[in-house]
Image (cartoon, helix red, strand yellow):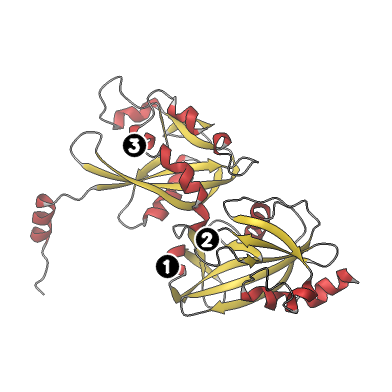
């Protein structure tokens, strides 16, 4: 293969100008009534007028409101750019990247370049946004309220109709950034979920939750049909450790989202689930709660308690389909639930 010279690269760039790649983030704050999209709100920023000097809009046409965003640097992935934008343009807020909403192509603000913007959905965790060089104020607004804004940046407006569908499927995503660990479980960086579940040479963490009621029954969830694995089957609760979270925070968040409760969680065990397609350290916790249980129907179809002894004797198998590891966890935790039964 001939050596590629600088002159050859410049010639290629002149004949085929690549688009400018941008990332915008849509920060979603979930309401107490899961699935009630009319009450869900999304963070929009009021553009600092000083920013207009950097743009090339006709006077009077500058957007007043927009989703936070910026260009992707050469050395970073779009997901890494999205996290950088969250930190720089929405300081004070912690959120978890969940899923790609859409990709929009458009001619740049000055008409000289073709731009491509990737929109990522983030789920709010905590904090309040602070004004900065890009935005002098922020507001959480519903989709209808955003649509009624005057001078909302047009590329953001193009994806508003796709946000609700993205929320429904956001926990089926392979776009989120997870904590990457080494073979000993030490945190070393980040990994995109899609990559984490396609190699067993890199490792990540997950929290698994065993919840029992005061009668010693195990509380399980029926996985939503939108899940990419185990859809419609009965399972324990849990999720992956997203970048920016500790494994303990992950456990508490998954408990709130999937069971709708808060209770003391105690560490049970850690084990490595290494298959042909992943290397996952599973941190197992257990807790006791009689509810009431609530859950996000985008993730969970139902919650039900099962007698542990009957489950191990397969007396439920004709009516309910359990994931294989449920039996293993119930057997391993026998000393916990038997004390409650007694």
Across the whole image, how many numbered discs are drawn on residues?
Answer: 3
Q: Which sits earlier in the primary sequence, circle 1 or circle 2?
A: 1
Which x, y percent locates residue 186?
56, 71
What element does badge 1 sit on?
Answer: helix
- Residue at the location (8% across, 59% down)? 7
Q: Quickly name the residue at label 2.
A: 227
Q: Which sits earlier in the primary sequence, circle 3 or circle 1?
A: 3
Q: Is residue 27 left or right of 307 when viewed as pictured?
A: left
Quote the CA–CA distance across marks 3 and 1. Answer: 29 Å
Q: Quickly name the residue at label 1.
A: 195
Up-down: is 191 above or below 331? above
Q: Which sits earlier in the primary sequence, circle 2 or circle 3?
A: 3
Q: Nearer the viewer, mark 2 or mark 3?
A: 2
Q: Is residue 258 visible?
A: yes
What element does badge 2 sit on?
Answer: loop
Which x, y percent locates residue 240?
56, 63
Which x, y percent locates residue 117?
32, 45
Q: Quickly name the residue at label 3.
A: 155
Mark 2: give few (<14), some (14-19) or many (20+) Cα within 10 Å: some
**Quadrant holding the N terminus:** bottom left
Q: Nearer the viewer, residue 234 or 15?
A: 234
């Amino acid at each position: 293969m001939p050596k590629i010279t600088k002159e050859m690269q410049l010639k290629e760039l002149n004949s085929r100008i690549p688009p400018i790649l941008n990332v915008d983030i849509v920060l979603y704050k979930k309401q107490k009534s899961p699935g009630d999209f009319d009450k869900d709100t999304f963070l929009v920023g009021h553009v600092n007028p000083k920013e207009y000097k950097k743009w090339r809009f006709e006077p009077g046409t500058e957007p007043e409101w927009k989703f936070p965003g910026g260009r992707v640097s050469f050395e970073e992935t779009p997901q890494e750019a999205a996290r950088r934008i969250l930190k720089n343009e929405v300081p004070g807020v912690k959120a978890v990247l969940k899923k790609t909403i859409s990709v929009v192509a458009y001619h740049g603000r000055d008409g000289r370049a073709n731009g491509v913007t990737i929109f990522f959905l983030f789920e709010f965790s905590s904090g309040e946004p602070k004004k900065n060089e890009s935005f002098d104020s922020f507001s959480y607004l519903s989709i209808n309220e955003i649509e009624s804004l005057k001078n909302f940046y047009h590329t953001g407006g193009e994806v508003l109709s796709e946000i609700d569908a993205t929320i429904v499927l956001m926990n089926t995503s392979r776009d989120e950034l997870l904590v990457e660990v080494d073979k000993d479980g030490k945190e070393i960086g980040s990994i995109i979920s899609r990559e984490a579940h396609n190699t067993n040479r890199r490792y990540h963490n997950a929290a698994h939750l065993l919840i029992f009621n005061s009668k010693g029954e195990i509380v399980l969830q029926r996985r939503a049909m939108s899940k990419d694995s185990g859809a419609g089957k009965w399972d324990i609760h849990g999720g992956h450790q997203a970048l920016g979270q500790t494994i303990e925070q992950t456990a508490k968040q998954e408990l709130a989202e999937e069971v709708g409760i808060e209770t003391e969680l105690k560490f049970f065990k850690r084990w490595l689930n290494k298959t042909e397609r992943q290397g996952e350290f599973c941190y197992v916790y257990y807790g006791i709660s009689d509810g009431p249980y609530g859950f996000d129907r985008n993730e969970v179809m139902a919650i039900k308690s099962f007698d542990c002894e009957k489950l191990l004797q397969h007396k439920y198998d004709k009516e309910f389909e359990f994931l294989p590891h449920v039996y293993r966890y119930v057997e391993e935790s026998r000393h916990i639930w038997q004390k409650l039964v007694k």
